Amino acid sequence: MNTQAIFDIESQHTSGLYSKRPVAIVRGLGARLWDSDGREYIDCVGGQGAANLGHCNPAVAAAIAQQAQTLISCPEMFYNDRRAELEAKLSSLTGMKRVFLCNSGAEANEAAIKFARLSTGRTSMVATMRGFHGRTMGALSATWEKKYRQPFEPLLTGVTHVPYNDLAALEAAVTDQTAAVLLEVVQGEGGVNPGAPEYLLGAQELCRARGALLIIDEVQTGFGRTGRMFAHQHYGIQPDLLNLAKSIAGGLPMGATLIGERVGDLPAQTHGTTFGGNPLACAASLAAIGYLEEHHLPEHAAELGAWFKAALAEIQSPLVREVRGLGLMVGMELKQKVTPYLQALMAEGVMALPAGLTVMRFLPPLVIEKDDLVKVVETVKKVLA
Ligand SMILES: *Cc1c(COP(=O)(O)O)cnc(C)c1O
């Protein structure tokens, strides 16, 4: 199919919910993408965080191919070998004993919200300004962005939003009615805002003191992105509920809510999903985690990310307000809207994404080579000049 035909058909039939770039991506390998005209791009969108393992990662592709010929569907009414292995693996990586498997980040958050209500018998929740947790009604209630929320109000009652990294505001908001505090370790969609150590440790302490659960949303920061397998491990905190998705299965749709000791036992039959824990996604996830570990990708992300952030910060431009991030999750905040600069980057062969209106966000696959990031820095410099 030629490029114009792809544009025409999608324009006619797509939901219309997304603002699309005028490019059709048809192939990927590692940290490279190709469009329908054969143009090559360095990918710093990374599937919006789903491509930490690189496009068409050979270990993930082989595991999917093999499992696809063994068993694809298997609801949780049955036990399954691949699911058992993955549950044990996620548990050993986090110290959290139980795992609920689902199919997306929003679903992982949705489950955590329900589990917090079941566990505490309370209904209120505290989330943060600029936080993002997904688009289903419960997850949306915790999400901050007004344009996502407003058309769907009324949402869940009892959700308070407090400024991020402000422990006093959190202390004032958490009451004996609070079921949970829901936080990202580094806010992603909200502008790449890393949490301060004393804030996250303080939040944990506060939750324990007031009988609330600490839900950590690592849908974007998980699986090596920030330089550790999970971002909360930089801070030494122990979440009560940990939400994962995006890169969990090497790019295949999957989510997980990990359940810690403070949650206690969940009553049977109170939640579930048909596709959750299907052997295909579990096999992909096991291969993805195995590859991350064998190739030391979290360490690679820490080293390369520190270099990349420093190199971007060295660019002398009156347009730049701040460069910040953790590992290979890096944001460059401009003093103006980033859309024209993202378009200019794409014209120069570099894909990056926004985080809000004024932040350029870079989420390259963790397999990216330094040479490619050198080119990205040069290109950013060029488009800002
Ligand atoms: C992307 C994201 C979500 C939503 O995940 P979906 O799979 O798109 O539903 C939730 N939380 C965070 C932190 C995210 O970055």
Image (cartoon, rainbow, N blue to C red):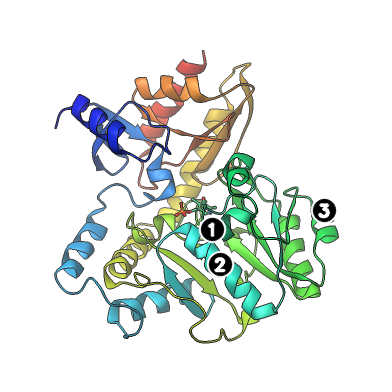
Disc on res. 242 = 2
The type of residue carrying mark 3 is Ala
Mark 3 lies within 8 Å of ligand 1 (Cβ measured) = no
Return the disc, 1 or 2, that comes first in the chain's sequence.
1
| Residue ID at (43%, 48%) | 49
Residue 71 percent coordinates (x, y): 20, 74
**CB at disc 1 and ligand 1 closer than 8 Å:** yes
Pointer 1 residue = 218
- Along the viewing direction, whichever of 71 and 82 lies nearer the viewer: 71
At x 57%, y 25%, the residue is: 314
Along the horizontal axis of the image, is 4 left or right of 105? left
Indicate left or right for 176 with 303 as reference. right
Q: Is the CB of mark 2 within 8 Å of ligand 1?
A: no
Q: How many marks?
A: 3
Identify the residue under disc 3: 169
> Mark 3 or 1, which is nearer the eye?
3
Secondary structure at badge 2 equals: strand
Rendered position, 249 above or below 310: below
Helix, strand or loop at mark 1: loop
Q: Position of residue 13 (x, y in %)?
A: 29, 38
Residue located 29% across and 44% down the image: 30
> Which amino acid, mark 2?
Leu
Left or right: residue 148 versus residue 371 is: right
